Image: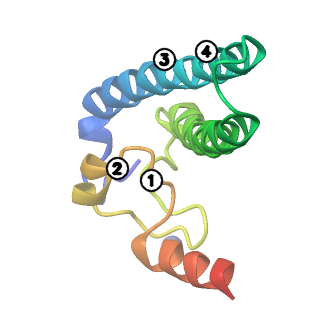
Amino acid sequence: MTDRNGVHRMHDQLQARLESERARLVARLSDVRASREQSTVTVIESVGSLDELGADLRVADTLDAQFRDALEAVDLALSRVGDPTFGTCIECGRPIPLERLLAIPEACKCVECQTREGRARRD
Ligand SMILES: [Zn+2]
């Protein structure tokens, strides 16, 4: 197995970072869900207005979706971390620079592919 970008040498560190990121996201997700329930309870007790509840729930839904997406990315990375393909781009197969992985351990695409996808989504 070649280690072109040095990723496999950093395996333990990256795995540890992914696991702690995963724990953080799970905790945030349950916070969001708890606060959504709290907002609903507040309105039922007629302390808040329905407009406020709508806004709170929209924020909660957005956060919920963001944390779920992030969690999915972390889970995908964790499932690949021991794999020879970990550290390579799932789109083009080129190695992802180690600096990028150290900054974003759950990155599964190189900057180029990520940027291209970001542009495609906006179109
Ligand atoms: Zn790529």
Q: Split into 4 quadrants, where in the image is the C terminus?
A: bottom right
Sequence order check, earlier mark of 4 and 2: 4
Mark 2 vs 1: CB contact within 8 A: yes
Give the alpha-carbon distance from disc 3 to disc 2, as whole Å.
Answer: 19 Å
Q: Which residue is mark 3?
A: 27
Sequence order check, earlier mark of 4 and 3: 3
Q: Secondary structure at mark 3?
A: helix
Q: Which residue is mark 4?
A: 34
Q: Secondary structure at mark 4?
A: helix
As shown in the figure, which amino acid type bears the numbered disc 4? Ala
Give the alpha-carbon distance from disc 2 to disc 1, as whole Å.
Answer: 5 Å
Q: Which residue is mark 1?
A: 107
Spot occupied by residue 107 in the image (x, y as percentages of width and height) = 45, 53
The foreground one among 96 and 35 is 35
Q: Residues within 10 Å of mark 4 (few under 14, many from 20)?
A: few
Q: Residues within 10 Å of mark 3 (few under 14, many from 20)?
A: few
As shown in the figure, which amino acid type bears the numbered disc 2? Ile
* For residue 123, above or below residue 64: below
Q: Residues within 10 Å of mark 2 (few under 14, many from 20)?
A: some
Sequence order check, earlier mark of 3 and 1: 3
Tag of residue 104: 2
Q: Quadrant of residue 105?
A: top left
* For residue 106, above or below residue 35: below
The foreground one among 122 and 3 is 122
Q: Secondary structure at mark 1?
A: loop
Residue at point 45%, 45% (across, down): 106
